[in-house]
Image (cartoon, rainbow, N blue to C red):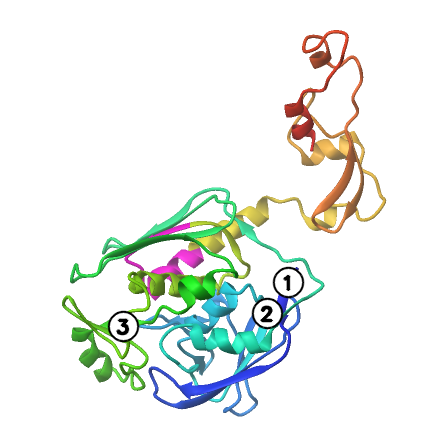
Amino acid sequence: KETTVLKEASMTGISLHSGAKVRLTVKPAAAGSGYQFRRMDLADQPTIPAFLEKVKQVERATTLAEGSVKVSTVEHLLSALRGLEIDNALIELDANEPPIGDGSAAPFLEMLAQAGRKELEANRAVFEIREPVYVTTPDGGYMAALPHDGFKVSCTNANHTHHHTQFLSLEIGPENYAKEIGRARTFVFYEEVEPLLAKGLIKGGSLENAIVIRGESVMSKEPLRYPEEFVRHKILDIIGDLALFPIPIRGHILAAKTSHGLNLLFAKALYKAYRAYQSSLMPVENIPVGERAMDTNDVMKILPHRYPFLMVDRILRFEGETKAVGIKLVTINEPYFQGHFPGHPIMPGVMQIEAM
């Protein structure tokens, strides 16, 4: 089932790039609404949906825009929501960025723990990766998705300094996201700080909310939280940026030398594959609802198989989008009854599975 927060919860803090004080509140939302950002500080309190097509900028953070209205640095909050499998939420804030907190998703996880989670009536759709999807960048970055029963990320963090190269492969779900990923903090290279300040960015940045890397040295208010904290934060960002994909993904994500730009390029490639898959499905309006039956001729209009591989003879009814009740007619004249166990006809298990 789809989920949302049980009740509203709030937090306050300083935003990373603008340095502004901000109050953020998360509220329950209806099924199918996804994540919606509402700017409470602007006239008419405009709302921006967290969709791929709303991404306008990816330099050092992911920025959404609707006309002239923007919300920046959304990836840590979205990562926490998707990591906890909260599918729908209304996010109200009185500035153009969420609070940066300590540079990780931990402050958002604390807020969401206060908000709780509840199931909604709608079934939760998932995009299951069936064929490989991949993208590459000229600097050697790549991301790929492979079929996998679950959600797994294998990521290599590499950079121009060749220091602190890290790799981590992890199965991720709501039961381990907070412990394994959510506490990993953002980081920046020392030589990048001055150029970022010159661009008007990281005005709220400090050693309290970021790790600064200088050569082999690490500057931080506290020790590293994980031996591989940098690659764990890269995975945190991947999850946050992929939360802009319309539904959760089931598959194995492989990534190296990632950035917000690469994450969004990959999300668009996934969306293209998702749309192609949707177009290959039979239109929903052609599927009977309730007790209306489909006979063999109706079945053959949908399935490409023919005898002896047509394993469904009749559909009695459909129950929603995930269940159907059908009939496979089996008689003693079936060829496989003649040789497997003479005198004791048994339908081979592989044929039973094929019919199902």
Question: Where 258 sits versus 50, above or below?
Answer: above
- Examine the structure image and report whether residue 288 is included in the region drawn in magenta: no
Q: Kindly identify which residue carries mark 1.
A: 2
Judged by depth in the image, the label closer to the viewer, 1 or 3, is: 3
State how far apart marks 2 and 1 are (Cα).
8 Å
Badge 1 marks a residue whose secondary structure is loop
Residue 102 is at least partly visible in this image? yes
Labelled disc at residue 223: 3
Of the image marks 2 and 3, the number of the one nearer the N terminus: 2
Q: Position of residue 213 (x, y in %)?
A: 20, 71
Query: Which of the two discs, 1 and 3, labels the residue nearer the N terminus?
Result: 1
User: Which residue is at the front of the view, 200 or 205?
Assistant: 205
Q: Quadrant of the C terminus?
A: top right
Of all residues, the one furthest to the right in this rendering is 291
Q: Earlier in the sequence, mark 2 or mark 1?
A: 1
Q: Residue at x 48, y 44 (%)?
A: 148
Q: Would residue 256 be counted in the magenta stretch? A: yes
Magenta stretch in the rendered image: 253-268
Which numbered marker is on residue 18?
none
Residue 315 left/right relative to 230: right
Neighbour class for label 3 at 10 Å: few (<14), some, many (≥20)?
few
The amino acid beneath tag 1 is Glu
- Mark 2 falls on what kind of element? loop
Residue on which the image places disc 2: 88
**x then y, percent, for residue 50:** 50, 71
